[in-house]
C-alpha cells in the first residue's frame, strides 16, 4: 500500500454525546426533580433502587455516589477491616484494590485465566485463616466462574463481593450479574453500559441486616441522621442522577443487544487474526469493553490509529504492579503479567455504524495481511 492513500474513517473509542431525542426525556426527568426539590435521596433514588433490585433478582439495592463508594461500603458492611485478608484479581481498575485497602484489610492478588477473569484455582491457593472475602471482578462485563468461587466461599466460610461495575445486565445460566455474591456492586459512571450523566453506583443484596447497615454506612454511619453507629463517609446518590438512570434503565436491554451484535460481527471478522472474547453457551455478556489479545498489540494499535481508529489499553498496569501496591504481591501472577501486555480494547458502542465496524474489521485484516 506504500505511496497509496488509504481511505480513512474516524472511529472514536466512545461517543458519550446524548442524542436530541434522549436529551428531551432526560431533561423532563430532571425537571421533575427541580419541581419537587428533593435533590438528595428524593423519591427517584428509591424507585431506582427498587427497579435495580428487581432487575438483578435481589431483595434490596442501595444507590451510592460511585462504584468505588459501593465497593468500600459493601466491604465495611461485611465487617471487613484491619487484620483481614481479601483476595481479588490482579487485573481491574484500581478502584477495586483501593476500596479493599481503604477498609484496612490486606489485599491479596490472584492470577487470572485466559478469559481475563480471576482464576478460582489461584484463589484457592491464597486462602488463609485470615481470608474474609473474595472480590471477583466481572472484567469487560464477562461474569466470572461463579460456581467455583461460590463453592470456595462456602467451603471456607468466606464472603463473596461481586465487583460487577462493568457487568450490569450480563447473564450466566439465566442469572444476572449481581445475583451471585453476598453483596454485589455496580458503577454507573458515564462510560458504563447502564450509565448516569455523572458519578453513580449501586449495591444489591438479599440480607436485610446488611441492607440496614448499608443504609447507615451510606450517610456518615448515621441512623436517621441523628445517631452515629459506624465510622463512614457521605456516599449518597444524587436524585438527579437517579432520575436519569430510571429513564435509561428502560432502554438498557436494547443497548446490550446492540453491543452484542457488534461483538458478534467483530468476532466473525477477526477471529483468524487475534484472540477474541468467547462465550460459553449459557453466557451473555454486555461487552463493556471488547478486548482482543495479540502478542503484536502495540504495533496493531499504532496501525489502527493511523487509520483513524481509536483503541485503548484500558488498564496498562496490573493493580499489583502499581507503585503503591506492588509490595503486596505474595505470589507471581504469570498469566496476568502476560495478558496485560497483549490486551487491546476495540471501539464498541451502540452508536457505531456498520461502516465503522467494517472499517475496524478490514483494518485488522489488513494489518495481519
Ligand atoms: C471493575 C471496576 N470496579 C470499580 C470501578 C469504580 O467505579 P466508579 O468509577 O463508579 O467509582 C470501576 C469503574 O470503572 C470498574 O471498572
Image: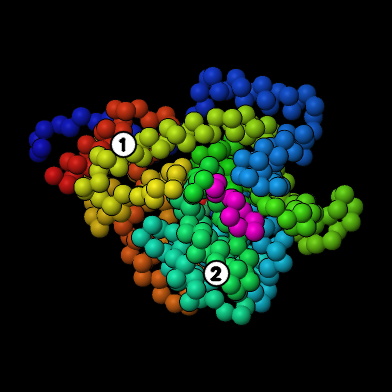
Residues marked 1 and 2 touching at CB (< 8 Å)? no
Name the spot of residue 359 as percent of width and height, x first. Answer: 26, 33
Query: Which label is found at residue 152?
Result: 2
Q: Which residue is drawn at 59% across and 37% down?
A: 196
* Residue 343 located left or right of residue 52: left
Residue 68 shows in this picture: no
Secondary structure type for disc 2: helix
Name the spot of residue 117 as percent of width and height, x first. Answer: 44, 59
Q: Which residue is drawn at 22% across and 39% down?
A: 363
Is label 2 within 8 A of ligand 1 (CB to nearest ligand atom)? no
Q: Outermost residue toward the bottom?
A: 129
Depicted 257 relative to depicted 325: above or below: above
Q: Residue at x 66, y 70 (%)?
A: 104
Secondary structure that dominates the magenta span: loop
Q: Residue at x 63, y 65 (%)?
A: 159
Task: Decide which of 139, 53 is in the foreground and name it.
Answer: 53
Instruction: Report the quarter where the C terminus lies.
Output: top left
Residue 54 is inside the magenta segment: no
Task: Decide which of 281, 75 is in the foreground and name it.
Answer: 281
Task: Decide which of 304, 161 is in the foreground and name it.
Answer: 161
Q: Which colour scheme is used?
A: rainbow
Residue 180 is inside the magenta segment: yes
Mark whose residue sits in front, 1 or 2: 2
Q: Quadrant of residue 84?
A: bottom right
Secondary structure type for disc 1: helix
Query: Which label is found at residue 265?
Result: 1
**Residue bounds of the magenta highlight:** 175-184
Amino acid at each position: 500500500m506504500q505511496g497509496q492513500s488509504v481511505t480513512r474513517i474516524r472511529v472514536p473509542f466512545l461517543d458519550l454525546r446524548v442524542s436530541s431525542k434522549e436529551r428531551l426525556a432526560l431533561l423532563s426527568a430532571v425537571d421533575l426533580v427541580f419541581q419537587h426539590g428533593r435533590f438528595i435521596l428524593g423519591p427517584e433514588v428509591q424507585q431506582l433502587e427498587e427497579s435495580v433490585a428487581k432487575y438483578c433478582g435481589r431483595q434490596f439495592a442501595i444507590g451510592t455516589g460511585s462504584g468505588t463508594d459501593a465497593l468500600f461500603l459493601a466491604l465495611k458492611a461485611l465487617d471487613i477491616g484491619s487484620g483481614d485478608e481479601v483476595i481479588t484479581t490482579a487485573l481491574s481498575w484500581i478502584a477495586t484494590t483501593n476500596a479493599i485497602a481503604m477498609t484496612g484489610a490486606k489485599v491479596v492478588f490472584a492470577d487470572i485465566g485466559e478469559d481475563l477473569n480471576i482464576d478460582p484455582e489461584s484463589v484457592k491457593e491464597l486462602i488463609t485463616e485470615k481470608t474474609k472475602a473474595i472480590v471477583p471482578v466481572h472484567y469487560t462485563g464477562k461474569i466470572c466462574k461463579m460456581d467455583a468461587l461460590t463453592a470456595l466461599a462456602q467451603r471456607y466460610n468466606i464472603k463473596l463481593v461481586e465487583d460487577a461495575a462493568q457487568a450490569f445486565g450480563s447473564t450466566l445460566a439465566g442469572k444476572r450479574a449481581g445475583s451471585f455474591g453476598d453483596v454485589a456492586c455496580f458503577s454507573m459512571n458515564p462510560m458504563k453500559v447502564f450509565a448516569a450523566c455523572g458519578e453513580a453506583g449501586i449495591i444489591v443484596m438479599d440480607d436485610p441486616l446488611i441492607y440496614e447497615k448499608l443504609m447507615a454506612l451510606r450517610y456518615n454511619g448515621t441512623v436517621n441522621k441523628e445517631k452515629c453507629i459506624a465510622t463512614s463517609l457521605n456516599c449518597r446518590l444524587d436524585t438527579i442522577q437517579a432520575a436519569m438512570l430510571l429513564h435509561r434503565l428502560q432502554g438498557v436491554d436494547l443497548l446490550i443487544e446492540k453491543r452484542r451484535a457488534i461483538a458478534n460481527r467483530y468476532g466473525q471478522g477477526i477471529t483468524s487474526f487475534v484472540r477474541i472474547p468467547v462465550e460459553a453457551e449459557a453466557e451473555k455478556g454486555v461487552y463493556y469493553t471488547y478486548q482482543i489479545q495479540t502478542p503484536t498489540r502495540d504495533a496493531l494499535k499504532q496501525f489502527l490509529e493511523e487509520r483513524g481508529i481509536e483503541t485503548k489499553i484500558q488498564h496498562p498496569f496490573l493493580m499489583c504492579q502499581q507503585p503503591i501496591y506492588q509490595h503486596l504481591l505474595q505470589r507471581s501472577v504469570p498469566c496476568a503479567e502476560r495478558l496485560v501486555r497483549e490486551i487491546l480494547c476495540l471501539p464498541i458502542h451502540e452508536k457505531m455504524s456498520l461502516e465503522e465496524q467494517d472499517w475496524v474489521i478490514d483494518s485488522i485484516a489488513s494489518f495481519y495481511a
